[in-house]
Image: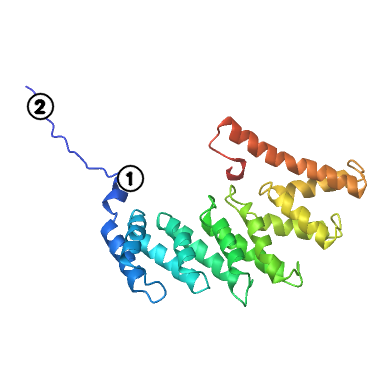
């Protein structure tokens, strides 16, 4: 006698299907279209507003909110309507986190009581660390803030605020492929390079070398310190300071070479994530 066993079919929704089902394109279009027409700072004509609203709507749920937030942030800081719209449009199809990073970095960069950068410079930095950054957005924001504070602190680096924005963005962006970011390594390197137990470099020399070394990964501080101590030790290589520094730099470079080798081999696991 044949026994029939009922089969239960379970509808499984994949992430891509869920994204399609939750895509409120009409709402995004209407919200953007009405904003462009009615906002006192924009007042865009219907014929010009429609294609913009259509492009924003293609960014799916949340697109209008991201677009409006960034465009308003820019116009309030002195950007023209045209430039504000052009800059905000790509964020319609971006993530909320990318939009948040852009706004946070831009506001700090342009604020008079913070970095006080010109509009163009603040915009460049904000894009560098948000839409043009493929790493951890939260981490790079934290790195940027920490490095900018460290840079402007008179007891640390003591650089003019106008220089700190670009410098902080440059160093923070080096952490794109590292989950831990680079600020921790950068700070440790800078302090060690200036210290009596280290190479005792000038602030300017320590600044440039720590920036270069931090880009080589989260182990850059440990690798350099251990190599320098061994190279300059009587029980080690007994090298003079300048030669010990060059040796330690060479050893530190091996971490970057190792990272590149893993990527070339096609491994999905990078040394920074072990």
Q: Nearer the viewer, residue 273 or 82?
A: 82
Residue drawn at (48%, 58%) of the image: 98
Residue 149 or 6: which is nearer the viewer?
149
Q: CA distance from mark 1 to mark 2?
A: 38 Å
Q: Nearer the viewer, residue 47 or 96?
A: 47
**Left or right: where does residue 96 sit relative to residue 114?**
left
- Which residue appears at 57% of the width and 56% of the height? 128
- Labels 1 & 2 near each other (Cβ < 8 A): no
* Residue that lies at the very extreme toward the left in this rendered image: 1
Badge 1: how crowded within 10 Å, few (<14), some, or many (20+)? few
Vertical order, 70 against 227 (above or below): below
Where disc 1 sits, the SS reads helix
Q: Earlier in the sequence, mark 1 or mark 2?
A: 2
Quadrant of residue 91 within the rendered picture? bottom left
Q: Position of residue 221 (x, y in %)?
A: 73, 51
Choose mark 1 or mark 2, whichever is in front.
Answer: 1
Q: Which mark is residue 16?
A: 1
Occupied quadrant, residue 227 = top right
When asked about the image quadrant of residue 117, the answer is: bottom right
Instruction: Tell me where residue 2 appears, x and y as whole percent.
Output: 8, 23
Q: Please name the colour scheme applied to the rendered image.
A: rainbow
Q: Going 73% across and 58% down the picture, which residue do you hit?
A: 188
Q: Is residue 15 visible?
A: yes
- Which quadrant is the C terminus positioned in? top right
Task: Residue 70: give its label.
Answer: none
Q: Mark on residue 3?
A: 2
Crowding around mark 2 (Cα neighbors within 10 Å: few <14, some 14 to 19, many 20+) is: few
Secondary-structure class at tag 2 = loop
Image coords of residue 133 (percent x, y): 54, 52
x, y percentage for residue 25?
29, 56
The answer to whether residue 221 is left or right of residue 177 is right
């Amino acid at each position: 006698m044949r026994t029939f066993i009922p089969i239960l079919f379970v509808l499984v929704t994949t992430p891509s299907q869920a994204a399609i089902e939750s895509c409120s394109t009409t709402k995004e279009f209407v919200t953007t279209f009405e904003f462009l027409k009615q906002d006192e700072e924009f007042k865009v004509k219907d014929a010009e507003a429609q294609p913009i609203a259509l492009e924003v709507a293609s960014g799916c749920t949340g697109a209008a909110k991201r677009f409006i937030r960034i465009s308003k942030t820019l116009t309030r800081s002195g950007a023209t309507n045209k430039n504000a719209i052009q800059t905000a449009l790509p964020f319609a199809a971006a993530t909320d986190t990318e939009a948040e990073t852009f706004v946070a970095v831009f506001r700090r960069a342009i604020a008079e009581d913070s970095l006080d950068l010109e509009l163009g410079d603040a915009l460049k930095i904000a894009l560098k660390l948000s839409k043009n950054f493929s790493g951890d957005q939260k981490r790079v924001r934290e790195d940027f803030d920490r490095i900018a504070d460290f840079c402007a602190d008179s007891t640390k680096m003591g650089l003019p605020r106008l220089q700190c924005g670009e410098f902080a963005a440059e160093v923070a962006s080096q952490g794109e492929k590292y989950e831990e970011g680079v600020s921790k390594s950068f700070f440790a390197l800078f302090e060690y390079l200036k210290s009596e137990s280290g190479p005792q470099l000038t602030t300017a020399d320590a600044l440039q070398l720590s920036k270069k070394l931090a880009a080589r990964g989260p182990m850059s501080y440990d690798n350099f310190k251990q190599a320098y101590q061994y190279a300059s030790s009587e029980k080690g290589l007994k090298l003079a300071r300048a030669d010990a520094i060059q040796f330690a730099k060479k050893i530190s470079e091996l971490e970057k070479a190792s990272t590149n080798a893993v990527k070339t081999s096609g491994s999905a696991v990078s040394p920074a994530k072990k």
